Amino acid sequence: MLHRHLEDGFADTPMAVEDVLDHGSVADWRDLAARVRQHPYGEAARSLRQVLAGTYMYGTTRIWIEFLRSLTGENLKINEAARKRWEECAKYGY
């Protein structure tokens, strides 16, 4: 997926990973998963952890936390403050 804010070569930045999680296709998700699986502590995985630590996307966050856990055994947690902000926005249709 061509990131809307960055040029080619920046696919593993937190901004690009967040864009893939939020707007990417299944093929984009597969590509990200393959990069993280290949290097569970590499740049894409670090960016994924950073995005998951700071945001909440309904359904998406849980899937990716479990994916990372399956690769590394990490006990990652959902950011409860971000989840609560999401719920408040969802109540009002944002």
Image (tube, rainbow, N blue to C red):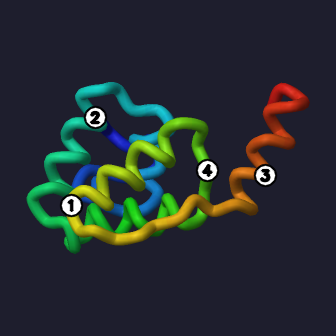
> What is the CA distance from the residue labelled 1 to the residue labelled 2?
19 Å
Upstream in sequence: badge 1 or badge 2: 2
- The x, y position of residue 19, in whole percent, is 46, 44
Which quarter of the figure is the C terminus placed in?
A: top right
User: Marks 1 and 2: CB-CB under 8 Å?
Assistant: no
From the image, tell me which residue sits under label 4: 56
* Disc 3 target residue: 84
Which comes before the other along the chain, label 3 or label 1?
1
Q: Amino acid at mark 1?
A: Leu
Rendered residue at 28%/34% (across/down): 28
First along the sequence among labels 4 and 1: 4
Q: Residue furthest right?
A: 92
Horizontally, is 64 left or right of 90 in the view?
A: left
Residue under label 1: 71
Label 3, label 1: how many angstroms apart (C-alpha)? 28 Å
Q: Is residue 76 above or below residue 25?
A: below
**Residue at mark 4 to residue at mark 3: CA–CA distance:** 9 Å
